[in-house]
Structures are given as structure tokens and as C-alpha cells.
Amino acid sequence: MNELVSLINNQPRTTSNRISEHFGKRHGSVIRAIENLEIDSEFRKHNFVLSTYISLQGKELSCYEMTKDGFMLLAMGFTGKAAMKWKLKYIDAFNNMEKALRDIVPVMDQMNTLVGRMENDKQIASICGKSLSKWKKLKAGYEEEYKKVESELQITLPFSQ
């Protein structure tokens, strides 16, 4: 796994299996550490989401997805030089993901504005197209009626020889 942090449900997150791999801990131990955190249910609900992943053996296994806050709370308990190195890498990865998301917001706003304008113009074109189609159907009738009225307008004078 190369990614430390990825976008999951539009939020920067990491997973317990990634943490176990990078911190050199058994995944079961990381899951137990998460489940043993003495935190209120609201914090747990927003920062630790039970999920699944497919193992290298093709088995579906449980894991937790966690936010930056969830990671930081969990990682506080990890000690040693190697743990500190990975804590800093994860914090940097979360910060980079958050910056990338902030940087893309103006572009997303621009895209949403463009899509809105396109949809509006598409509706106008559709209405115009329907009107043009209706006009084409009515035009022949108008032309025929026009010719009839036009012929009635022609004054004919009797001509005598």
C-alpha cells in the first residue's frame, strides 16, 4: 500500500490495516486499540468507521477507516523512533490531502457554475427546438391558408371585348 491517506466518502482518511502495516503492528492489535479507546460515541462515530477490505488471500476482513483526528488519537499511544517517523509521515499526508482539497474548491465551484450554465442553455435550446419543430408542422398550413386568402384579395375586373 503506497497511499497513507486517501479520499474516502469525500474526506481524507486512512485505515487500520495501513496503520498496522506501517507501524509494524498486528492488525488485530490495532483494531483492539481502536475499540479500547475511551472516547464518547459521537467522536467515535465521526472519526472511526467500521469497514472491510480484501486481503492478499482474497478474504474480506474488517478494518476501520479513520479521520486525521482519529489517527492522531490512536497514534498517541504508539512510541519509539519508527513510530514517530510514521506519525510525522501520516500527519504530512493528511495535511497535503486537506490542502489539495482546499485548492480544488475554486475549480469545483467553477465547474458547478459551468454545468449550471450549460444545463440552462440546453433547456433553452430544447424549448427552441420544440418550438421550431412545431413551427415546421404549422408552416405548411399557414402557407396554404395564406395563398387562399391572397387569392381572394386578387381583384378581377371583367374585361369585355
Image (spheres, helix red, strand yellow):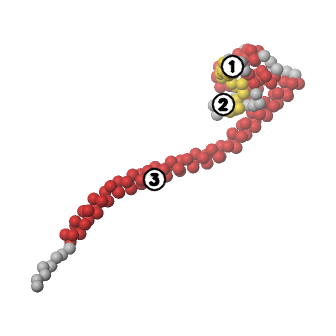
Q: Which residue is mark 1?
A: 58
Outermost residue toward the right in this view: 81
Q: Spatial distance from mark 3 to mark 1, Cα to Cα?
A: 51 Å
Q: Residues within 10 Å of mark 3 (few under 14, many from 20)?
A: few
Residue 74 position in % (x across, y down): 76, 22
| Lower sequence index among marks 3 and 2 | 2
Q: Is residue 123 above or below residue 157?
A: above
Camera-side residue of 95 and 57: 57
* Label at residue 28: none
Mark sitting earlier along the chain (1/2): 2
Whether residue 28 is visible: yes
Quadrant in the picture for the N terminus: top right
Q: Residues within 10 Å of mark 2 (few under 14, many from 20)?
A: few
Residue found farthest to the bottom: 161
For discs 3 and 2, the disc positioned in front in the rendered view? 3
Q: Residue furthest left?
A: 160
C-alpha separation, residue under disc 1 versus residue under disc 2: 21 Å
Along the line of sight, which residue is nearer the eye, 39 or 132? 132
Residue 109 to residue 43: above or below: below
Q: Quick one: label 1, few (<14), some, or many (20+) residues within 10 Å?
A: few
**Residue 76, visible in the rendered structure:** no
Instruction: Report x, y in % for residue 79.
Output: 85, 21
- What residue appears at the point 25 percent right and 66 percent down from the top-left corner? 147
Q: Which residue is mark 3?
A: 125
Residue 29 appears left or right of 61: right
Residue drawn at x 75%, y 17% is 27
Left or right for 117, reference 129: right
